[in-house]
Amino acid sequence: MNNRNDEKEVTRRDSISVAGVAGLAVLAALDTSRAEADDDNTDLVVEIEEVLRQTEERWNSGQRNTLREMWDTDDAEPWYVPEEYREPFTSWAEIDEYWNPGTSGLDYFRWGFSNVRAKRLAPDIALALFDHFYELKVKGEKQRPWGGFDRCLAIFRKKPEGWRHILYAQCPLGSEIYMRALREQLVKPGFETWKAQVEGK
């Protein structure tokens, strides 16, 4: 009896040891997967930033007729949501007219971005959120240039030539937050130096 109990106890200990080793192996694998995911996300951000940088160059050099190159032109229903229009654009005809207006629409547009965050939704689909600023002038003799800043949400599809837009949406801040941000920008750069001088008296 004792031998059988001893054998059972040994078997139980062996099983626990094996389970423990297996558990540690799974945890190690999960840690590795997380690390690889972090590395992949870093690479993804770099890749998306490159697409946005090329987009920026096209806007700011006036080469708006080349902006399509940053989009998946095989997509029959691209979505483009500019802040200054009430209705979103969901066709290439609308987007092309926006990029290359005739007698109305945009005259000049300067575009910039920062603080890119990206997330892979599928092997060939990625989502990005970033800060965006712009300066523009609408066509017309009496129109004056104006600018703004907001957040942008974009979805990209991986193509042989790289990531390409399938959705671009400007996401304006709420009025209270926006006004507060504008007031913060009015503070002169030397404020902190002046504050330190006052506190030192």
Image (cartoon, rainbow, N blue to C red):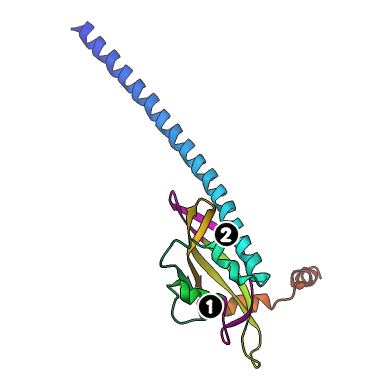
Residue pictured at 46% horizontal, 39% vertical: 33
- The foreground one among 39 and 176 is 39
Q: Is residue 33 above or below residue 175?
A: above
Locate residue 142: give its quadrant: bottom right
| Residue 163: image tag | none
Circle 2 crowding by C-alpha within 10 Å: few under 14, some 14–19, many from 20? some
Q: Which of the image's four quarters has the N terminus?
A: top left
Tell me where residue 87 appears, x and y as whole percent: 43, 80
SS for dot 1: helix
Q: Earlier in the sequence, mark 2 or mark 1?
A: 1
Q: Which residues are magenta?
A: 100-128
- Residue 116: which disc? 2
Does the image show residue 134? yes
Q: Where 46 sits versus 169, above or below?
A: above
Percent of width and height locating residue 52: 59, 61
Residue at label 1? Answer: 98
Foreground mark, 2 or 1, reads: 1
State whether residue 14 is above or below residue 183. Answer: above
Left or right for 56, reference 11: right
Relative side of 191 to 107, left or right: right
**Amino acid type indicated by mark 2:** Val
Whether residue 107 is situated above or below residue 166 in the rendered picture: below
- Determine which quarter of the picture holds residue 15: top left
Residue depicted at x 66% and y 84%: 145
